[in-house]
Structures are given as structure tokens and as C-alpha cells.
Amino acid sequence: MFESRTKVFYGWWIVLSAALISCYTAGAFFYGFTAFVTPMTDEFGWSYLAFSIAASLRGIERGLAAPLMGLLVDRLGPRKLIFSGALVAGLGFILLSRTDSLIMFYGASIVLSIGFSASANVVLTTAVAQWFHRRVSLAMGLMTTGFGFGGLLLPVVIWLINQYGWRTTLLLLGIGTWVIIPLLALVIRHKPEQYGYLPDGDFLPVQENAQTGTNEVEFDAKQALRTRTFWLLSLSFAIRFMGVGAVILHVMPYLTSVGLASGSAVLVATFIPLLSIIGRLGFGWLGDVFAKKYVLALTAAFQVAGLLAFYYAPSLWALIIFLITFGSGYGGAIALRLALQREYFGRSAFGSIEGTSMAVMTIGGIIGPAFAGWVFDIRASYQLAWLILAIVTAVAIPLIMALPQNHRQVSSST
């Protein structure tokens, strides 16, 4: 028995659900946190470095939790993890709203990060990777655009802070997490074979089981870890995450420190993720037309150019160049990395491999925000941080160029 081919492939509904979860997560947690830097440091008298340490602690948690979440999503499927993660993340927001000390701030930030580790990132990308093969670049690009659209929530978060204060805003974000994410998770399914499909919407008779396979390369996590390909890809992104993490957390404090009006700073911070959408879709499409590793190297060059342009803010032309190159560069890289990983290592252990890779990449996300905050504290300026991070990011380009051309060359690159 076959399902009608005229219906929309269910994998696209999973992409939509994952994109919407990513949108809320990005707006409330990833991009939204820059809006809390000034009000919280002003109220408690904390340094920017002290605040940035919370981002680094969240990065440490994500790095430690990612391999476990990858293993769990491979074994249990994504929906159970998303439900439980939303419960914990909502609690983290509530605890943050009650913060009265730096220690409590750090602890609540870790709780929040644990929750989103289970309800986003590795879990969502694994859910999408299970349902696509030929169209994986497009699927990942569309799914990650949700993260980009999350930037539209930043002005909402700022408005809530201005109207009701940062504590009430965090409380509302916690309640929203408890309601929105579980509802969207109802759409998520694990493997297409369980529902009579193959990836991309190819059909199987419903009585056939998940053992019916396709001619795909398949690595388990241990095999992937023994390849040079895994380490080249993961380390190149650990390097790139330094600059991304630093910019996302410090963009508003930096721009206001160089004289840009707060409203204009909000506009710039909002356009970073929005322009990343162009990169996710545009570079994702290019990755299906040309060799993905060359397109990925181009995104790294864009990111370097963006960091160098950011050095010259608040010049209007510098900010325009920054937004176009940095936003599209890091956005496109996210979709391409996931597609490359799926192409190189397959999908049977995608979650475990992605979780381990995230643990490596998170090192950059830990170092970058703290480094930028430290530079500002000792120099009262961020400029040196952007220059150094641009130079460091450039190191990722030769690492990417050393990647194999296709999955058939992975086994020989151990």
C-alpha cells in the first residue's frame, strides 16, 4: 500500500515545526540575551566580563550535553527530548527572573541552557536529517532560517524590557517556552521508515520495516571520530564560533559604546539574523550546485570581511558591509555544515556525531564572548577584539579547503 504522491511529504512539516521552534529559541535565548546586558549590568554593577561568563558557562554546558543529547535523540527520537527540554528551559527563564546575585545568575543560565540543549540544536537538526538525503541542503537551509527569523523577536524583547522591566520579560519568556515549544513538538516524528517512507519522500510499502535501506554511506560515532574529516569540519567551526558568539552577545553594547543611538543599535542587531536568512538559503542552494566545501570556504571569507568591517563602526558603509557579509556568511555556514556532515557520515548516527561535533565547536562559543568582554573591560573599547577575531576566523579557511570532495573520500582521510 502506498500513500498518494500528491500529498506534501511529511518531512517538510517537520522542517516547518523545527524552524518555528528555532525561531522562538533564537529570539528568546540566543539573540535576545544581548538586550539584557545593559539593564542587568546597570542594576547589579557587574562588569561586561562577568556577564559574558554566563554565555561561556552556557557554552560549556552545551558542549558537555551535546554528545549525550545526540545519543538520546538517536535512541529515543526527538519529541520526548523536546518536551522535557521545554519544561527545563521555561524553569530556567523563571529562575533568571528571580536573580539577585551573580551566582544565581550563572546557575539559572546553566539551567536554561540545559533545557534548550534538549529542545533545540542537535535534536532539531537530527530530526530533519532523518527525513532528507538528496534535498538535505535545502531542508537544512529552510529549517535554519527559523533561527534567522528569531532576530525579529529581539525588538519585541527590548520593548518588553522597556515597558515592564527585565524580570517580567524573563518571566513571560518562560511561560512562552512552556506553551509554544511543546505544541510545535507535536508535529515532530523520528524516522521516515516508521511511516512508510524513505528520505526525500520516496515511498516504501507500509508493511516494510526500517531495515529497508538506501545506498547511503553510514558511519557510527566512533568511526566518524577516527576520520580527519570530522576534526577538520568541527575545528573550523569552533574557530568561527568565537567571532559569532562575541558579536551576537556584544553587538548592542559595542555599537552604543561607539556613539550609535540605542534604536539604531537595535536595528543592526535585528538585521544580523535577518540577513543570515539570505545566506542560509542562498549558500544552501549554491551548495547543491557546486562543491559544498568551496562554498563553505567562501562563507568563512565573508565572515572575516564582516568582522573587519565591524571594526570601523559606526560608519554607515562599514555597518552595511558588516551586515551583508557577516550575516550571510555565518548563516550560510550553518546550513552547509549540517548538509556536509549528513553527506559525509550518513544519518543512522547523525545525532551522536552532531552532538560530539557540537562539543568541539562549543569551545569557540565559550572563548569568544568572554574574550570580547575582557578586551572591553581592560581597554574600554571592542575594536581590538574584532580585529583579532577576524584574523583567527581566517584560519578556518585552509581547514575547510582540506576537507574531502565527497563522502567516498572520507574513509581514506582517517
Image: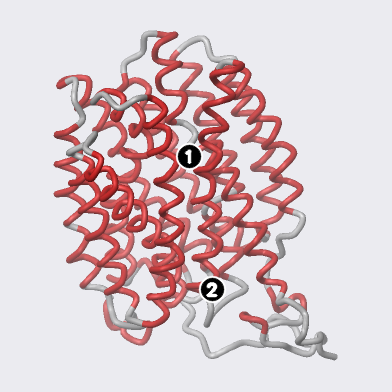
Q: According to the image, label 1 marks what residue? A: 30
Question: Which amino acid type corresponds to the residue marked 2 in the rendered image?
Answer: Arg
Corner quadrant of residue 310? top left
Residue located 62% across and 57% down the image: 18
Query: 373 or 74: nearer the eye?
Result: 373
Residue located 72% across and 51% down the image: 184
Image-based side of 261 in relation to 312, left or right: right
Residue 262 sits above or below residue 323 on the image = above
Q: Position of residue 26 (x, y in %)?
A: 52, 43
Corner quadrant of residue 142? bottom right
Q: Marks 2/1: CA distance?
A: 27 Å
Q: Position of residue 47 (x, y in %)?
A: 31, 16
- Can residue 60 be spotted in the picture? no
- Can residue 145 be spotted in the picture? yes
Q: Pick whichever of labels 2 and 1 is earlier in the sequence.
A: 1
Image-based side of 261 in relation to 342, left or right: left
Question: Which amino acid type corresponds to the residue marked 1 in the rendered image?
Answer: Phe
Q: Position of residue 127 (x, y in %)?
A: 61, 63
Q: How many marks?
A: 2
Image-based side of 94 in relation to 365, left or right: right
**Can you name the residue that lies furthest to the right here?**
1
Q: According to the image, label 2 marks what residue? A: 347
Residue located 72% across and 72% down the image: 10
